[in-house]
Amino acid sequence: MKRQLGISVYPDHSNLEDDKAYLALAHRYGFSRIFMSMLEVTEGKEKVKRKFKELIDYGKSLGFETILDVAPSIFEELEISYDDLTFFHELGADGIRLDLGFDGNKEAMLTYNPFGLAIELNMSNDVAYLDNILTYQANVPFLYGCHNFYPQEGTGLPYDFFMQCSRRFKDKGIRTAAFVTAHSGKIGPWDINDGLPTLEMHRHLPAEAAAKHLFATGVIDDVIIGNAYASEAELAAMGAIDRYQIAFALAFEPEVSVLERQIALKEQHYRRGDITARMIRSTEVRKKYKNEANPAHDHLNMFQRGDVVIGNDGFGKYKNELQIVLEPHTDERKNKVGQIAESDRLLLDFIHPWSKFTFSEKKGTKLDV
């Protein structure tokens, strides 16, 4: 399933021109999905319709898909019904997210709306909610899942619970989404904004590192920045990530050679199928570079988890083999060429037998993670 990057906008807490400028900037960096909150509307049906339609239409002109976050109170405020989704169709929305659920039959019926609007469900509960809806023969291609975000420090989902919830949807082939936070973003739906991630462990991570982690889990298709506005640097960093394989950010040692940089950055790596606990081995590169000299330059420091090493001239047939250290050890036949950024080290657990991976250069000092 194609993976998307998304942004969030809050039209009742911002102005239209700023929102449009944000959409244009995000589009430049490969974002294609909008989470748009309607939970705070209070201005009356016609004014709300004009404001939201103009922004949604502008997003559509850039290729964005827009899902509106709605709740029962909004239907009351706007005097519309769940039995008739004409209002959202007229806005130009591609779907609505149900912040609260019904009895299962209701959600299933909504997926047969005549406008082809997607019905997005709340994924952040480990209950048989989706199973119930599917027993009522829902129109599955029009059924999405999306986690909540959590504005208050300490309230985000724990990882194991997140995985349990997510697998309920992913195992059924439902499109899934979750949120990361932009540290420059100050706008959210409420007056508390300690960041807007789904996972608590992501609250203080860079947005691109959290996005890499969500994609690496294999249970999330779309990653959305929960707050607005992300900076251009954050959008660029997220837009540059590989959504389909892990690309570690690597800070090089000062002594790294041109050859070692070439091996690390210019090759497609994969972990051997017969794995070892001590390190992740990328062995094909040693065959390609078997005739290239690689003098020793390390000084028998203890290699630590997340270090990247390459066999030097003293390593015989293993010369120029690249390894990522998982367990501390020393070996004078290996050169330490760099260290994976601290925020990317949680991705090491997702490199399984035969997993593909690459490296990108982490700018700045080794400690700039």
Image (cartoon, grey):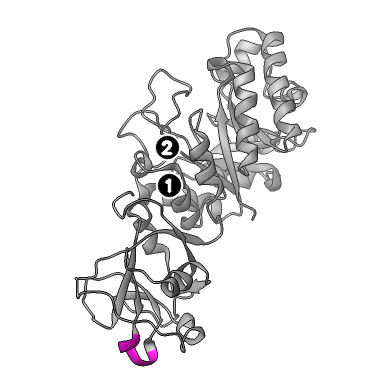
Question: Is 303 above or below relative to 10?
Answer: below
Which is nearer the N-term, disc 1 or disc 2? Answer: 2
Point out which mark residue 210 bears.
Answer: 1
Rendered location of residue 308, percent (x, y) = 35, 69
What's the residue type where badge 2 is placed? Pro
Q: Are marks 1 and 2 in contact (CB under 8 Å)?
A: yes
Residue carrying label 2: 197
Confirm whether residue 302 shows in the render: yes
Residue range highlighted in magenta: 313-317
Membership of 315 in magenta stretch: yes
Of helix, strand and loop, which one carries label 1? helix
Question: Is 277 above or below relative to 74?
Answer: below
Few, some or many C-alpha atoms within 10 Å of disc 1 (few <14, some 14-19, many ≥20)? many
Membership of 273 in magenta stretch: no
**Residue toward you, 284 or 78:** 284
Confirm whether residue 68 shows in the render: no
